[in-house]
Image (cartoon, helix red, strand yellow):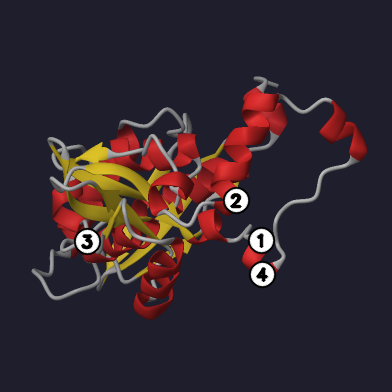
Amino acid sequence: MRAAQVMTPDVLSISSDATVFDAAELLVGTGVSAMPVVDGTGRMVGIVSEADLLRRPEIGTEPRKSWLQRVFADDVAAAAEYVTLHSRRVRDVMSKPVITVQEDDTLRHVADVMEKRQVKRVPVMRGDFVVGIVSRANLLQALLSRDPTGAGPHPSDEQIRREIEAAVRKQAWTSPWPTNILVNAGVVHLWGFVPSAAASDAYRVAAENVAGVKKVKNHLRRMPASVGMGI
């Protein structure tokens, strides 16, 4: 799946010339936690979030620095911090550059970006323009759309058995000892020996993921270590 297939379109945005009060009113009124900031041409130039507006002198939440931090403060950094804390313009308090993805990026890439950059949502771009937002919730919605427990064809027990055997056969954890898979009315019974409890769980999960399986009864037993050592 691609970002464009799961994103939330019609993204709320705010002008870079707007005030922090305008931004706060929009965030509170719409229930979103962040929104893109655009210039006069509609191009995104930043993003403003609840976190960008938390530290404000108007409500007494500006950060306090120790005397040691004040002594060693860099003049340039101090000036930049003053602008961020005291400016009433969104362009001065917004976060930039913005972490984005393209509309044709895969969900794997989107998830990688979110995890690496530790963000909960990313704007989706078409060139220089925002066309949507992908959040963690959108990824969960995509997962739910792939839930196999809906209506569909009901495979036969033999089909289920063959699919489980095929799914297990190509895995590195496949048991070197004999195993058997029996299916009756969609209920799978797993018999035989496996080298570890983890391998037993892997067999169970492989069976659960096959369409048409109603239940898995796992009778697999762990082979004693002495057998594995050839004693």
Packing grade of label 1 (10 A; few <14, some 14-19, many >=20) is few
Packing grade of label 3 (10 A; few <14, some 14-19, many >=20) is some
Q: Quadrant of the C terminus?
A: top right
Is there CB contact under 8 Å for labels 2 and 3? no
Return the residue found at the far left: 153
- Find disc 1 in the rendering and name its residue: 57
Q: Quadrant of residue 44?
A: top left
- Find disc 3 in the rendering and name its residue: 11
203, 229: nearer the viewer: 203
What amino acid does circle 4 point to? Ile
Q: CA distance from mark 1 to mark 3?
A: 30 Å
Is 153 rendered above or below residue 120? below
Q: CA distance from mark 4 to mark 1?
A: 5 Å
Q: Earlier in the sequence, mark 4 or mark 3?
A: 3
Q: Earlier in the sequence, mark 1 or mark 3?
A: 3
Is there CB contact under 8 Å for labels 1 and 2? yes
Q: CA distance from mark 4 to mark 2?
A: 11 Å
- Find disc 4 in the rendering and name its residue: 59
Going 17% across and 48% down the picture, which residue do you hit? 40
Q: Earlier in the sequence, mark 2 or mark 3?
A: 3
Going 25% across and 73% down the picture, which residue do you hit? 185
Q: Position of residue 95 (x, y in %)?
A: 44, 43
- Of tags 1 and 3, the one toward the viewer is 1
- Left or right relative to 231: residue 94: left
- Find disc 2 in the rendering and name its residue: 85
Q: CA distance from mark 4 to mark 3?
A: 29 Å
Q: Position of residue 217 (x, y in %)?
A: 45, 65
Is 190 rendered above or below residue 154? above
What amino acid does circle 2 point to? Leu
Q: CA distance from mark 1 to mark 2?
A: 7 Å
155, 64: nearer the viewer: 64
Q: Position of residue 171 (x, y in %)?
A: 37, 32
